[in-house]
Amino acid sequence: MTATLLVGPARPGGAAPPDRPHLTPPGKTALLDGEAGLAKVDADLLRARLLDADGLSARDVVRRVPGLDVQDDLVALDLTVDVTGRVEEALAAAGMIVDDTYPQYGRIAGRAPLGALAAIAAIDEVRLVRQVIRPRTRVGSVQSQGDAAIGADVARSALGVDGTGITIGIISDSFDAGSTGTVSGTGCTRTVSGTPSQLSGDL
């Protein structure tokens, strides 16, 4: 058996790959509304944008695009972006309210009108624009995606273990931010109370 390996010239200096607009899925092309920059935006947001442009109310848009997190006519967004002071100013000028910035992860979270998506996507530093999926409550027992991500399902089937009798502690990095909660106690008996997540019933 003979195999042929074709090797093209390397990109100089580790340059980023060129844009490939031809890789946009055919089903998404119709949602771009003639604006190539919108290829950075996920398909559900593009659908919602067109519905909004057609004059549908925010409530009707959410009915048509389940999972969209819209409050006060602003949709929650998660951006993959080159985080700089300039880009935050550009996002604000485009109509986005920046809630959180994570330079170490190249992410910005915030809210914006659906009509601002084109202006947001046109910013050079913005790589991807995704919706923040609205959480669903009172759905009963569910299987976490983390179960498969960390191989716990494989461990159960291969080793016959399920964690019964094992005491664990969980530290969430989402608490590494300003909070209105209080910490009481000392050492290992310290407890956190009064945080927004606890008061809302999420924890």
Image (spheres, rainbow, N blue to C red):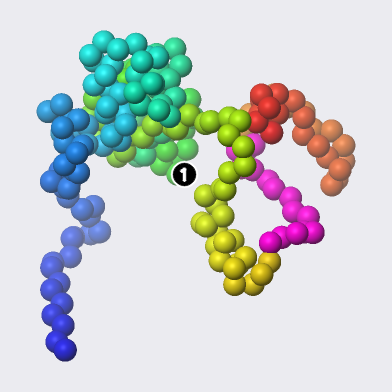
Residue located farthest toward the front when viewing the structure as drawn: 140
Q: Is residue 145 above or below residue 68?
A: below
The answer to whether residue 171 is magenta is yes
The mark tally for this picture is 1
Please tell me which residue is depicted at 56% across the width and 48% down the height of the picture.
Answer: 144
Q: Quadrant of the N terminus?
A: bottom left
Query: Observer-nearest residue: 170 or 28?
Result: 28
Crowding around mark 1 (Cα neighbors within 10 Å: few <14, some 14 to 19, many 20+) is: few
In magenta, the rendered stretch is: 162-176
Residue 88 is drawn in which quadrant? top left
Residue sitting at x 41%, y 41%: 106
Most foreground residue, 18 or 135: 135
Regarding residue 125, the answer to whether it shows in the image is no
Q: Amino acid at mark 1?
A: Gln
Q: Which residue is mark 1?
A: 104
Does residue 33 appear in this view? yes
Where does the image place residue 55, in percent across and percent down from the top left?
26, 10
In the rendered image, residue 13, in percent from the top left (x then y), is placed at 23, 59
Residue at x-position 24% and y-position 15%:
53
Q: Quadrant of residue 96?
A: top left
Q: Is residue 98 magenta?
A: no
- Residue 85 coordinates in the image, percent (x, y): 38, 30
Judged left or right of residue 105, residue 25 is left
